[in-house]
Amino acid sequence: MNLRKGSSAGAGTGTRRSARSGGDAVHAGVLVALCVGVWYTQALEVSVGKVHFVEAMNGSTVLLPCTYISCIGIKNLYFSWHYNNNGTMQKLCEAVIPAEGVEPHVSIYQPRVEFVGSSKNSNISILLWNVTFEDEGEYTCYARNPKEKNRNHSAIFTLIVVDELKEVDNTVTIIILSVLGGIVGLIIVIMVLKALVLFILRKVHAKNKECLVSSSGIDNTENGLSGSKAENKATPKA
Ligand SMILES: *[C@@H]1O[C@H](CO)[C@@H](O)[C@H](O)[C@H]1NC(C)=O
Ligand SMILES: *[C@@H]1O[C@H](CO)[C@@H](O)[C@H](O)[C@H]1NC(C)=O
Ligand SMILES: *[C@@H]1O[C@H](CO)[C@@H](O)[C@H](O)[C@H]1NC(C)=O
Ligand SMILES: *[C@@H]1O[C@H](CO)[C@@H](O)[C@H](O)[C@H]1NC(C)=O
Ligand SMILES: *[C@@H]1O[C@H](CO)[C@@H](O)[C@H](O)[C@H]1NC(C)=O
C-alpha cells in the first residue's frame, strides 16, 4: 500500500520521472499481487524438491529433503516427519521453530533419524541412517504456521530401497540415453526432411521462374511483333 502511494506521488511530481516511477509502480503492483495471491492460496509452502523419490541401497544413509517457503514470515512454525507404515502414520520427529533463524529443538522418535535441517535456510530435512528394506515407502514432511490459522501443509517423499544401486542406475541411464538418442534421431530426420522440402520448393520455384522468363520472352516478342506491326502500319502512312 505504502509502495503504491509513494510511486504514484512520484509520478505526480514530474513528467521526467513519470516513466520510471510508472515502472516502479508496476513492479510494486506485481509484487503486492504476487504476495496477496500467495497469501490467499498458500502463505506457507512445503516442498521436497523437484524429485519426489530417492533410490537408496540397503545399509546406506539417505537424506529425506524438505524445505518451506513463507510469504508472510513464520512464528512458532510446527513441523514433523511421518512414515506411512502400511496405512498408519508413524511419527519420526517433530519440532517448533520459534522464529526465522532460530534453530528448533527437535524431538526424535526413531533412533535412526537425524535432523540435519536449519531454520537459516528454511531447511527441515532429515537423515535416515542404515536403511533397511522395511524403510521403503512414503515419508510425509508436514508443517503448520500458526500465523495463517493453522492451515496444514505437507509434501510426500518416497524412499525406494534397492539391493544394488548400479543396476538401477544403468537401466535409468540406458533409458535416458535411448530417449535422448531417439529425440536426436527425430531432430535429424526432421532437419533432413526440411532440407529436402526446401530443396524441392527451390527447384519448383526455379522452374516457375524459368516459365515466367520464357513467357515474358514471349510477351517481348509479342510486343516486338506489335511494335513491328505498328512500324509496319506506320510505314505505309509515311
Ligand atoms: C542388503 O540386503 C541383502 C539381501 O538381504 C544382503 O545380502 C546385503 O548384505 C545387504 N547389504 C547391506 C549393506 O546391508
Ligand atoms: C498392510 O495392511 C493390510 C491390510 O490393511 C494387510 O493385509 C497387510 O498384511 C499389511 N502388510 C504389512 C506388511 O503389514
Ligand atoms: C549404522 O550401522 C553401523 C554399522 O552397523 C553402526 O555402527 C551405526 O551405529 C549405525 N547408525 C545408526 C544411527 O543406527
Ligand atoms: C538441507 O540441508 C541438508 C543438510 O545440510 C543438505 O544436504 C540439503 O542439500 C539441504 N537442502 C536444501 C534444499 O538446501
Ligand atoms: C491439521 O492437521 C492436524 C493433524 O493431522 C489436524 O488435527 C488439524 O485439524 C488440521 N488443521 C487444519 C486447519 O486442517
Image (cartoon, rainbow, N blue to C red):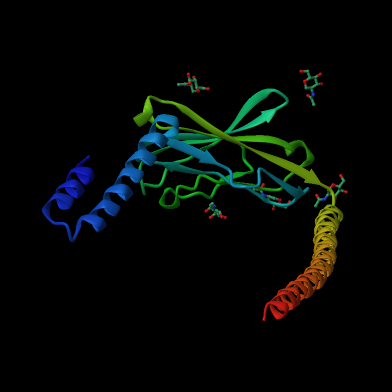
Q: Which residue is depicted at the point 69% across and 39% down?
A: 158
Residue at image coords 11%, 53% = 13
Residue at coordinates 68% horizontally, 34% vertically from top-left? 138
From this view, report whether residue 160 is shown above or below residue 223: above
Front in this rendered view, residue 121 or 163: 121
Q: Is residue 58 left or right of residue 98?
A: right
Task: From the viewer's side, name the closer residue of 219 and 123.
Answer: 219
Q: Is residue 125 above or below residue 40?
A: below
Measuring 82% from the left and 72% from the top, which residue is drawn there? 214
Q: Is residue 74 among what the camera can see?
A: no
Quadrant assignment, res 151: top left
Report the side of 172 relative to 22 (left or right): right
* Nearest to the observer: residue 118 or residue 230: 230
Q: Position of residue 5 (x, y in %)?
A: 18, 43
Q: How many marks?
A: 0
Quadrant housing residue 32:
top left
As rendered, which of 50 and 37 lies closer to the eye?
37
